[in-house]
Amino acid sequence: MPLTHGEGRTTDREILRLAVPAFAALVAEPLFLLTDYAIVGRLGTSALGALSVAGTILATIVNLCVFLAYGTTAAVARQVGAGNHRQAVQRGMDGVWLAAAIGVGVVVVCWPLAPGLVGLIDAPPEVTADAITYLRISLVGTPAMLIVLAGTGVLRGLQDTVTPLAVSVGGFALNAALNAWFVLGLGWGLAGSAWGTVAAQSLAAGAYLIVVVRGARRVRASLRPDPAGIKASGTAGIALLIRTVCLRIVLVTATVIAARLGIAEVAAHGITTQVWTLLAFALDAIAIAGQALTGKLLGAGDVLGARRVTGRMVMWGVVSGVVLGLAVIGCRPFIPGIFAAESAVAAQIDAVLWTVALFQPIAGVVFVLDGVLIGAGDQRYLAWAAAVTTLAYLPFALLAGSLVGLWLAIGVWMLARLATLGLRARGDAWLVSGA
């Protein structure tokens, strides 16, 4: 049953109330990461290549733990929809404790393995030493990064995307300022960029802890670690972890193939990946609204409302994808110059951005449906679908003989995701109601 005009406008307002602040917060991260690339670009192509390699590894580690945000958002939102506000905040505290524990474990395990992790990328020898240095310094900030993920999930589940916006903009602005000071002002080189990120992430984590602890005290939720609750949060995140592993296989494989194509290709791939991430985060704003609204509506038992909101958000995803694709085409001539890219790197970027623009409308729908199903708690299907789409992508990527061919393979992956998520959303199996 379609929405009436009045219902559609009300739904749009609710989507935008959550999506607009989420959009600004999400876009802040890749914008400031692009600033990092622009700053490091002044150090030369080798430094850019090292940042691309180490950044891919660090992003893989952190994104494997994205369930701390997504799973927490869905769990908290369901409890909010059911009217269980104290339990909602308690689930959020469990997620924060889990994030801290995982973060410490990552530092202990990955610090000595840094050379081996960089070696897996098969990067050119001239970037290896700097990549190891950047990775090891950045690992120090991993616990803070994961606490930021969990804290963001708590607030999104509570239907608050404004506070994460304030923390993100403040944290990433500080990150950009510190990186400029450390790299260009103090002459610390690539290591300065890593230390700037560690400092900014630590302060952002502190801000989230203050907000979440205050919220817990208001509803008299326990601040102590609850082993049973932490275990439940970890168990619920396993399927999302599998999904994320598959996504990271796609992206890491792309970086490995780009590195084997040459130093210009891997540098161009790193910059293009940051542009893609900026676009993805922009589109993911609607997906975050989908997580929060779907969890809340299903928690309240409103199955019809969840389906109606999904249809509306898909429409927003298509429109947003078209707009972003046109923006990429318009900005394409200027992007290489922002990063002071050398001519060989600039030529590669210029060619690949056409492919990036082409697939934005498809990405708009994919991200919305992904967010809706996460909010519904349909993690098992998402894990299965991620495995299937990764298998569809790998043959095309491995056969790619150029950077453009590699990004066309990523386009095939997006089409496969559209098919699997679209089929699921048309059915009813994901519409499970109740807390």
Image: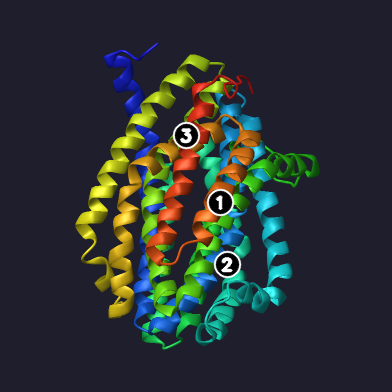
- Which image quadrant: the C terminus? top right
> Mark 1: which secondary structure?
helix
Residues under numbered marks 2 and 1 in contact, where contact means CB atoms less than 8 Å apart: no
Residue at left offset 49%, top offset 23%: 426
Q: Amino acid at mark 3?
A: Leu
Quarter location, residue 309:
top left
Indicate which disc residue 50 carries.
none
| Mark 2 or 1: the one toward you | 1
User: On the rendered structure, is 332 left or right of 103?
Assistant: left
Label 2 vs 1, first from the N-terminus: 2
Residue at left offset 44%, top offset 73%: 266
Q: Residue 210's spot in the image, x, y percent? A: 56, 51
* Closer to the camera in the image, 75 or 321: 321
Quarter location, residue 147:
bottom right
* Closer to the camera in the image, 207 or 396: 396
Q: Amino acid at mark 1?
A: Leu
Q: Amino acid at mark 2?
A: Ile
Residues under numbered marks 3 and 2 in contact, where contact means CB atoms less than 8 Å apart: no
Label 1 vs 3, first from the N-terminus: 1
How many angstroms separate mark 1 from mark 3 (CA)?
15 Å
State whether residue 214 appears in this view.
Answer: no
Indicate which disc residue 369 carries.
3
**Residue behind mark 2:** 57
* Furthest residue in direction right, as rendered: 227
**Residue behind mark 1:** 247
How many angstroms separate mark 3 from mark 2 (CA)?
27 Å
Q: Residue 164's spot in the image, x, y percent? A: 45, 48
Q: Is residue 173 above or below residue 134?
A: above
User: On the rendered structure, is 217 left or right of 353?
Assistant: right
